[in-house]
């Protein structure tokens, strides 16, 4: 048992003569031995805690994990127990250990000196052991030499995992080319891989977009991309086409290593990647409304030079370097409208063309020439966006015009004592024939007709008479006239008096006709009318009888001829 061991022992002494005096033994005075000493217990180590030690999972390269070990000296605290020393011995399975303690007094506990862990330099399971070497130390107690006690084994478990590893994204840079304003926003899918080893000790990869610059757009994300796998469908970059200009900028890809179903550790942010995106947005060309509109040619005449009107067209798109050029062509005429088939090619923004496109009307036939022509328009990317031509909304040119026949003046006999002869279209003769001196005045009436060619598309007839050279005849109704619509006539008359000297009388007058419509009045060729009469003496009675009979016969013939002339002219007028 332990404790102080003080006591005595009695020593009995005898003098023994054997082999010497042979005398019998003689008792001597006894002696007392006083004995003192102490008995000490060895130190007693508790079982260490925790046991086993599970340090969990770590990332490769993390600070080495550590777990403090708690040990107590469970020897009795009655001053007869030695103290406890502890230190680490053999290590296995990648386990690390550090620390020791000495002279742990009985009843005391140490939970700060001993620690176990494992290295994170390599991945994998880190299960192993650390031996705790225990010693009972008699310093300041028994003073005895140290006594080795039974060692303890600390079982340590844990694992080291790699972070996910993102490949460089592709493509890089992303060139989305040129687009038109308002087009569907262009997009490019981004490819990323988790290049971490597929040995069970690598985490998964998450990706999402962060900061965007320069008008770049981005969409999509992915989570838990397994090691060795590739994603080429989740992430996309692009740019908005709402406004024109260069759309070069960047999109940040935020990357995360995710321990779900692997290490179980909290997510770890990885270095982000920058996607450089380039592209541009261009305006389509913008055509101004053409001028003039509508185009009105008024009324022109059959066979006249065909009227023509050039059109002005501008490309009103801004001239800031992000607008396309304008193409235009004119065609598809209707309703008697004509075009020059002209074209404008690559009209620059801010520019106008006033010569290339024109419309007109045909004067080959009478009638309404009102119709349309179509200006086909296209936006041309040559020298700007480089994009293929884009058809723009066409414009309709409304053209009004009318082609008339000229008024058709003709003289015709109506009644009276004369004959009217048409020598040519512009030369007529009104002949009163031979009359007896002082036989009276002779009246002849003729008409100036606007010969009917077309009741709608023919000018009205007007005109004046030049009568200044007429001295032998009396004129009635020779005033300016008009407008006379097709088929109608103006009716002057001429009187010749026989009360004058015998002889032949001739005068000439001129009709200066005009052809008029709502747009213009045009002079026509002058018509010459020759007036003639022959005055003869009154004959002797017998001769007079013969003369009167002859004159009567002549008068009858004239009346018949006049009736034929009127009938013929009426037919001409109706035509």
Image: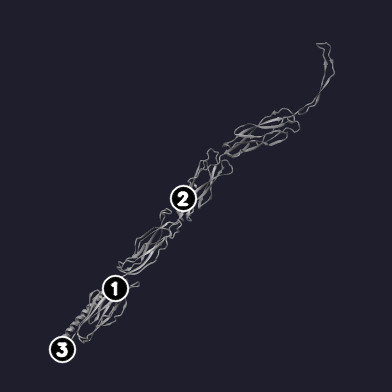
Residue farthest to the bottom, as pictured: 541
Q: Residue at x 30, y 80 (%)?
A: 479
Give the number of callouts.
3
Labels 1 and 2: the sequence-earlier one: 2
Residue tagged by mark 3?
541
Q: Residue at x 16, y 84 (%)?
A: 550
* Disc sitting over residue 524 in the figure: 1
Secondary structure of the residue carrying numbered label 3: helix
Neighbor class of circle 2 (other Cα within 10 Å; few <14, some 14-19, many 20+) is: some
Q: Which residue is more in the foreground, 504 or 339?
A: 504
Residue 238 coordinates in the image, percent (x, y): 49, 51
Along the polypeptide, which appears first: circle 3 or circle 1? 1
- The quarter of the rendered structure image containing the N terminus is top right
Q: CA distance from mark 3 to mark 1?
A: 51 Å
Q: Quadrant of residue 436?
A: bottom left
Q: Dot 1: few (<14), some (14–19), or many (≥20) neighbours within 10 Å?
A: some
Residue 335, visible in the rendered structure: no
Tell me if 333 is positioned left or right of 549 in this view.
Answer: right
2 or 3: tag closer to the N-terminus? 2
Element at badge 1?
loop
Image position of 274 with respect to 409: above or below:
above
């Amino acid at each position: 048992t332990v404790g102080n061991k003080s006591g005595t022992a009695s020593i009995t002494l005898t003098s023994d003569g054997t082999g010497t005096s042979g005398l019998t033994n003689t008792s001597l005075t006894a002696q007392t031995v006083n004995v003192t000493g102490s008995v000490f217990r060895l130190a007693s180590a508790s079982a260490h805690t925790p046991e086993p030690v599970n340090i969990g999972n770590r990332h490769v390269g993390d600070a080495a994990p550590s777990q403090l070990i708690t040990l107590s000296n469970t020897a009795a605290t009655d001053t007869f127990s030695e103290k406890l020393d502890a230190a680490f011995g053999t290590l296995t399975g990648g386990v690390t250990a550090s620390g020791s303690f000495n002279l742990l007094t009985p009843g005391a506990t140490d939970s700060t000196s001993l620690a176990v862990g494992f290295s994170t330099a390599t991945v994998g399971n880190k299960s192993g052991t650390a031996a705790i070497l225990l010693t009972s130390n008699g310093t300041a107690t028994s003073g005895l030499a140290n006594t080795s006690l039974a060692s303890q084994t600390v079982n340590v478990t844990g694992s080291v995992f790699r972070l996910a590893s993102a490949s460089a994204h592709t493509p890089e840079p992303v060139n989305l080319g040129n687009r038109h304003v308002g087009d569907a926003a262009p997009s490019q899918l981004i490819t990323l891989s988790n290049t971490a080893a597929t040995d069970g000790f690598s985490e998964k990869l998450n990706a999402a977009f962060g900061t965007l610059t320069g008008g770049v757009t981005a969409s999509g994300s992915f989570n838990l991309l397994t090691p060795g796998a590739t994603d080429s469908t989740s992430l996309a970059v692009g740019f908005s086409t709402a406004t024109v200009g260069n759309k070069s900028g960047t999109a940040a890809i935020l990357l995360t290593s995710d321990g779900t179903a692997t290490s179980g550790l909290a997510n770890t942010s990885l270095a982000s990647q920058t996607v450089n995106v380039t592209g541009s947005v261009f305006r389509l060309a913008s055509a101004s409304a053409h001028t003039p509109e509508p185009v009105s040619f008024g009324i022109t005449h059959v066979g006249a030079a065909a009227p023509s009107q050039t059109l002005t067209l501008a490309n009103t798109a801004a001239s800031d370097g992000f607008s396309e050029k304008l193409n235009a062509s004119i065609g598809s005429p209707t309703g008697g409208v004509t075009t020059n088939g002209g074209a404008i090619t690559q009209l620059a923004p801010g520019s106008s063309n006033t010569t290339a496109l024109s419309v007109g009307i045909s004067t080959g036939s009478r009638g309404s020439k009102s119709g349309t022509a179509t200006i086909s328009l296209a936006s041309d990317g040559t020298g700007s966006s480089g994009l293929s031509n884009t058809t723009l909304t066409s414009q309709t040119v409304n053209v009004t015009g009318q082609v008339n026949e000229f008024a058709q003046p003709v003289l015709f006999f109506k009644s009276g004592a004369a004959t009217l002869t048409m020598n040519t279209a512009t030369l007529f003769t009104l002949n009163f024939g031979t009359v007896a001196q002082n036989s009276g005045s002779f009246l002849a009436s003729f008409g100036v007709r606007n010969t009917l060619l077309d009741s709608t598309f023919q000018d009205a007839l007007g005109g004046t008479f030049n009568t200044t050279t007429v001295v032998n005849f009396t004129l009635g109704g020779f005033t300016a006239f008009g407008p006379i619509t097709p088929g109608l006539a103006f009716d002057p008359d001429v009187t010749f008096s026989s009360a004058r000297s015998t002889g032949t009388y001739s005068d000439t007058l001129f009709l200066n006709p005009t052809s008029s419509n709502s747009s213009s009045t045009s002079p026509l060729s002058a018509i010459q009318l020759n007036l003639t009469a022959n005055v003869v003496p009154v004959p002797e009675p017998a001769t007079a009888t013969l003369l009167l009979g002859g004159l009567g016969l002549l008068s009858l013939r004239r009346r018949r001829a006049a009736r034929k002339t009127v009938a013929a002219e009426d037919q001409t007028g109706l035509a």
